[in-house]
Amino acid sequence: MQRTKTALKYLGLGIAVTVMLGLAIAPFSKRLIEQWSRNDVEARSRLVYNAVQSQIVAAMADGDNVQLSLLFSAIALDQRILAVGLCAPQGGLIAPTKMMPAAFSCEKVARSDAESFSTIAIDGHRIMVGAFPVSSGTTRSYLVILHDLSFIDKRSGEARAFIIAVLFGVAVAMAGGAMIFVFVTLRGWMESLRRAVEDVRTGTSSLAATRDQSAIDVQIKKLLSEVEVGRSAINATQIEWSPTTLQQLLRDSLPEAEVLIVSNREPYIHNRDGDTVSVQVPASGLVSALEPVIRACGGTWIAHGSGSADRETVDRHDRIDVPPDRPAYSLRRIWISDEEQEGFYYGFANEGLWPLCHIAFVRPTFRENDWRLYQAINERFADAVVQEAKTDDPIVLVQDYHFALAPRMIRNKLPKATIITFWHIPWPNAETFSICPWKEQIIDGMLGSTILGFHTQFHCNNFFETVDRFIESRIDREHATVTLGGHETMVRAYPISIEWPPAALEGQPPVEVCRAEVRAALGLAPDTRIAVGIERFDYTKGILDRMRAVDDLLTRQPDWKGRLVFVQVAAPTRSKLSSYSSLQDDAVALADEINARHGSADYTPIRLLIRHHGAAEVFKLFRAADCCVVSSLHDGMNLVAKEFAAARDDERGVLVLSSFTGASRELAAALIVNPYHLHEMATALDTALRMPDREQQERMRAMRQQIREWNVYRWAARMLIDAAASRRRQRIFDLAGGAR
Ligand code: F6P
């Protein structure tokens, strides 16, 4: 009882210290965030000003207000910018954008030689006005950029809520710890009492049992103290995540855990060509993200053996150690017949779920037989997990829309497994998802997971909405969990990324050499500007749209003719499906048409290279390019965008990026475009190709910094830390004799 009192005393003290800490930190954090956000807004305005100053001067000189309007509208596409306009020397407002508040007047703008920032209140909103002098001839106007500062209050509120939540969490953890401690102590005490009575009755000693109980106490305390350790590590920005830190994390937070990956696409494909067997790394975002992770962690990757020499290269257990040159993990191949492949991969996954989840206006097709085969193949992979698992509680990383049913199947076979499912494509809204005839089974299958990850919070929200509509379950939005049949699934956003530093950068010659080599290989003049697009030949990627944008640019600005070449690399994919083969035909026809319209005997503006390119080739092309166009109509993340930035260690080159990619949430320094708006894309291409060096550098540096900090090791670490916390919670419950 003395220990219980002491625990309660320390608990009270801990809570008091936590509350005092909270009260002390909250105002300080508000000030800090206010200052930081203002600096952020100022820097953003400055960046815009530097970027467009010369274009404004040119338009002013021509007296071209239409050009100014177009330019300002493009600037105002940035979600943070409220409105843009030009204050004329006489005080009038020229070319204000749509959201310019009616109450705004140029009279209030400070007119000085240098930039100035002021805050005004309009309709209860705090608006920051940045005014930048722009001189044309003898007249001076002011570019005004308005930012709505309400986001700062929101940000401060969120930070305060976060601090309070963390402190509350600490207090709850302490209370929980103390309660468990008290509970276990009490239980041990009752047990001791019972045994003492028994001892008195029988004359024996219960010393050994007491020793067992205190060993459990020690374990629980250790587990509790470890729960938050990983979380603080993941938030520490100073940690540069790498294979080493990931391994360290596994050692510290998940000792002895075995890792299994389940995916359809395998990381290494063996193909026979006559007498030789070659190894191919497929063009797959999933593979390029997960391969470095499993190389760091070790374990087993279970995937479909799709290569023509795959069977002859495995051992009698269908396993092969990979990577071929430096084995670090085991690849277990699963065999799928052609008929099964038709129904499972081409049918249900790629004619059903793929178009269902992507807004690209291709109609999803669902067939009974495809569904039957989808179930059968999911079951086969779940069985393989059981065969490969050496323990009863492995960590299983289930990948993508090919395996929506596998999590539940694995859970039934290995109830203690930690199943982390990652959905690499978008999740549609509930209305759209209701098209799927087997929606309930799909959702139920996914809710067998311990953790379910999407790229963006938006897709998590769509998932919650879908579950809410079609399944009887408990949704806790505050903790982002869904509980079904007593089992809880955490639903979280984990934006995927790439390895850093990227392996494909190793051994790359300097940018100038890459450029010269690419120009020589394509037979281009030494001063040709190069724009590139690189991806699988998929209708979600907006390949036709970007070719049309090039067409539009060459039509509206013929001075680019002969000087600009657009290189489109497209790896054939899923070609058996008509939606894919017809895209390929359409792209070839469109390229021919544009080339005929703008080309000549020695100038071909669009180069369409339809074949798989290895990582080194892709990086060389990225390094040779002046700009890269990622115009996906809809994309979960799009790792090509991140790879382009990763390839540019010279901090040059411009990324034109669709706003419908997950990547656009992180890479705000790209030129963000709506791929459905041809004219906007063409203008962005032009801006990219004319962008001053300084601005290219600033943008590229920001993107590279973001990717370096939030690389794929951190992506994996975030999920593994959440997995570790979940496992510890379960162990505490088990030790305390409860169930979850
Ligand atoms: O985008 C989803 C995804 O699974 C990616 O991870 C990957 O790049 C692509 O689809 C691969 O498609 P497939 O395996 O059908 O070639």
Image (cartoon, rainbow, N blue to C red):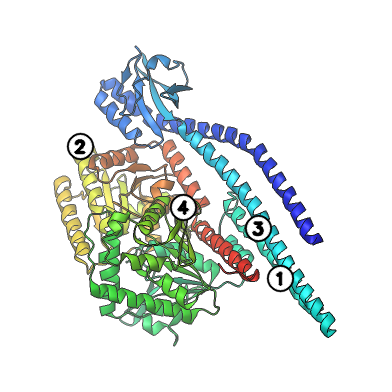
For badge 4, the amino acid type reads Arg
Compare residues 284 and 11 and report the one nearer the observer: 11
Q: Which residue is mark 1?
A: 216
Q: Which residue is mark 3?
A: 176
Q: Quadrant of ligand 1?
A: bottom left
Of labels 2 and 1, earlier in sequence is: 1
The quarter of the picture where residue 194 lies is: bottom right
Q: CA distance from mark 2 to mark 4?
A: 50 Å
**In this rendering, is residue 175 above or below 346?**
above
Upstream in sequence: badge 1 or badge 3: 3
Q: Earlier in the sequence, mark 3 or mark 2?
A: 3
Q: Say which residue label 2 marks.
A: 556
Relative to 385, 568 lies left or right: left
Q: Earlier in the sequence, mark 2 or mark 4?
A: 4
In depth, the one of 510 and 228 nearer the eye is: 228
Give above or below for 39 relative to 618.
above
